[in-house]
Amino acid sequence: MTIKRTMLAGLVVWTGALSLFAADAAMKPVATIGDTAISQTELERAVGSRLTRIRTEEYTVRRAVLDDMVATRLLDAEAARRHINVEELIKTEVDAKIVEPNRTDLEPVYEGISDRFPGQTKEQAIEQIADGMRRQRIADRRAELIKQLRAAAGVKINLEPPRVAVKAEGPSRGNADAPVTIVEFSDFECPFCSRAAATLQQIEKVYGNEIRLVFRDYPLASHRTAKRAAEAAHCADDQGKFWEMHERMFGKGGGPITDGDIDRFAAQIKLVPDQFASCLASGKYKDAFRASQEEGYHAGVISTPSFFINGRMVIGAAPFETFAGVIDEELERAGIAPNRVRQPKVVEAERSR
């Protein structure tokens, strides 16, 4: 008993010394300006969430490797259960269950994208399309097998993603009590934001009341008309038509948005002309973007579009599958089984290119 007490006392002393060392390191200056010091703690406070992008990228790499490790062990276990090797399991459960692309189905696909195969005969192009489809179907079937094995084994991922607290303020649509909130920092002149807008529409159709979308302004300095466009969108919001203006602006596909464009869009969505013109002339929303832009910057936003799904950062015009993966995880975390209305199908020929 005396030995145990001695060991416990030693552990307490060691732990206390470690805490003092950590506290001392936090207070140690990382820079001095004459007699003034900047401590590690002050630096960390100033950095705040600006490292979110790096931490998110690190998490993405770790998660991909972890998922590969889980998949490998699941396949090994399933093969062992069947008394076969993994190669035989893949042949049985993946390769043998793939439907080969049909020539009849490939003809119209080729006709629609024939310009993408310069210098190739029709036969060569169709073979390339078929090969791409075949590889995609194999990848999809393997992913489905892994999903089934994960469900049967009760796999639980405990790796925590980095999160940032961003305010869900600004124009929004969707269920106010949705378990998943997507906050988007965007720029109306940004072509990638325009591409992402179409993806978000797919997400809204698929997840319905399970998500809420919030739009926040982040006009880039290099986009000279982005601030004016944001101002016009807020003026449209005064008449309850922010999203209609949002869709017209992003429908242009990116690039400068002129006053002529704004006037045309306003007419298309039937804004009251005098009220809209008066709003723009008053400068009422000229600086409305600043608070949103500043918060986005401190949250780690340096490019558009940038999204925070329940605080988890997604950078750029990511594909539907990327958003869906995060949304599904957040729903599961909330104890809700993902119930997609209909997952948009990516054309196999597009994937093969």
Image (cartoon, helix red, strand yellow):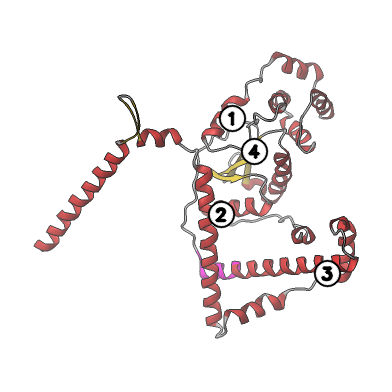
* Numbered tag placed on residue 344 in the rendering: none
Kindly give the residue lying farthest to the left in the view shown: 2
Amino acid under label 2? Glu
Q: Residue 332 location, x and y as percent? A: 55, 55
Cα distance in 3D space between marks 2 and 1:
28 Å
Cα distance in 3D space between marks 3 and 1:
49 Å
User: Image point 87% across, 63% down: which residue?
Assistant: 120
Of tags 2 and 1, the one toward the viewer is 1
Of tags 4 and 3, the one toward the viewer is 3
Q: Which residue is mark 2?
A: 329
Determine whether the residue tagged by mark 4 lies in a helix, strand or loop.
Answer: loop
Cα distance in 3D space between marks 1 and 4:
11 Å
Q: Is residue 3 above or below residue 46?
A: below
Q: Which residue is mark 3?
A: 127
Cα distance in 3D space between marks 3 and 2:
38 Å
Cα distance in 3D space between marks 4 and 3:
38 Å
Circle 3 Cα neighbour tier, 10 Å, few/some/many (<14 / 14–19 / ≥20): some
